[in-house]
Amino acid sequence: MSRSDVPTSAPLDDLFADAIERAAVSVVSVHARTRLPATGTVWRAENGASGGIVVTASHTVEREEEITVGIGGGTPIPATLLGRDFNTDLAVLQIDETPGSPIDERVAPSRVGNLVFAVGRPFGSITATFGSITAIAPVPVSKVEAPLLIAAEVTPLPGFSGGPLIGSDGSAHGINTSGLVRSGVLLSSGRGFVTIPAAQVSAVVADIVRYGHVRCGWIGVGVKPVELPDELRNHLGGQESGLMVTEVKPESPATGHLAIGDTLVMMGDDNHPLTDVGDLQQLLGSRQIGKPTMLTFIRNGAVETAEITPIERPERLRC
C-alpha cells in the first residue's frame, strides 16, 4: 500500500486542534501558591470593560494576596480573590486587564460519550489531553451534595485544576479540579479529577461576584432519608423514599408548617421527588431564596402540602 492509499485523519485532527486553539485564548496560568502554578479560565467579561472574571480551583489558591494570572511569557496580571466555594472547589478572581476572551459555555447538555479535552496552561504553553465523558452524576461533597459532577476519561496533567473541559467546538463543559477527589468525591473515571458543570460554575460566579459568597436557600429543618411504606409508594408513583423531619428550627420558614415526624416527599411546582438530602439541597439554590415553594409531605399517613418561602441560609450555617 502506498502512502497515498493510507486513510488520513487530518480533517478530524484539524477539528480538534481548532477547538483547543479557540479555547486557549481563555485559558491562563494562575500563580497563587509556592509550588507549581495552576490553570484558570476567563469565564466572563466585567460589564464590557477590559477586566474580567477568572475561575480556578480553590485548593490551588494558597494565598489571598499577590495572586497573578497570565498567558505565555506575557507580563503577569494582578488578580483579586473575590471569594471561594469549598463545596465545588471553585475560586473566583477579578482582573482589571483580561489577557484573553471569555470561554464559550457549552449550550447542549453534556452526555456520556461526548469526546472532550482537558485543557491547561500551568507553565505558559497550552497543553491538552483527550478522552470522553464516562459519567454524569450527583456526588456527595462533605455534608453537601453538588448538583452534578462530570467524570471524563482524560489524563489530568500537573497544574490542570482550574482549566476547562472542552468539546470539539471549543466550548466548556465545565471546570476541572482534583480538589474534590482529595475531599472524598469518587466517580468511576479513576483519573483523579472531576469537572464542575458550566451551569454550576456560572451560578457560583454570579453569587460570589454579587454577594462575596455562594447563597443557599434554607427552610430550617433537619432531615434524614427514610423508606416509604408500600401504600404510599403506590400513591406517589413508585417513589421509594422521602425525608423525615428530625428538627424544626424556631422562627424559621418551616415553623408552623412542618413538624418533627413529617416526611417530605416532593417540592416545587413540578413536584420534584425528595428521595435524599441532596435533592432538597439542590432545590434550595440561590434562585429559590424569597420565592414561595410548595412542599408535599406525609403526616400521620396522609398527604399534605404547605407553601414555604426559603430564606438565605444563616451565616453560621453557610453552605
Image (cartoon, helix red, strand yellow):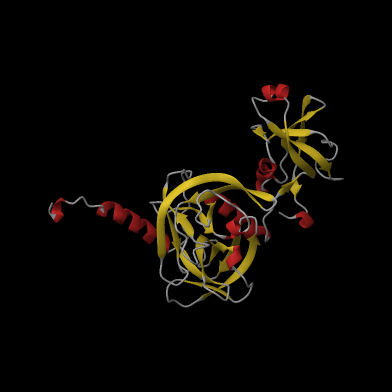
Nearer-the-camera pick, 296 or 47: 296
- Vertical side of 166 occupied by 122: above or below: below
Percent across and percent down for residue 14 are 29, 56
Residue with the most extreme right position: 250
Percent across and percent down for residue 216 are 70, 50
Horizontal side, residue 314 vs residue 98: left or right: right
Percent across and percent down for residue 136 are 52, 45
Horizontal side, residue 231 vs residue 57: left or right: right
Residue 113 location, quadrant: top left
Check the picture and name the quadrant holding the C terminus.
bottom right
Horizontal side, residue 195 vs residue 303: left or right: left
- Vertical side of 224 occupied by 169: above or below: below
Percent across and percent down for residue 42 are 50, 62
- Vertical side of 209 occupied by 68: above or below: below
- Vertical side of 221 occupied by 55: above or below: below
Q: Residue at x 77, y 36 (%)?
A: 244
Q: Residue at x 78, y 53 (%)?
A: 314
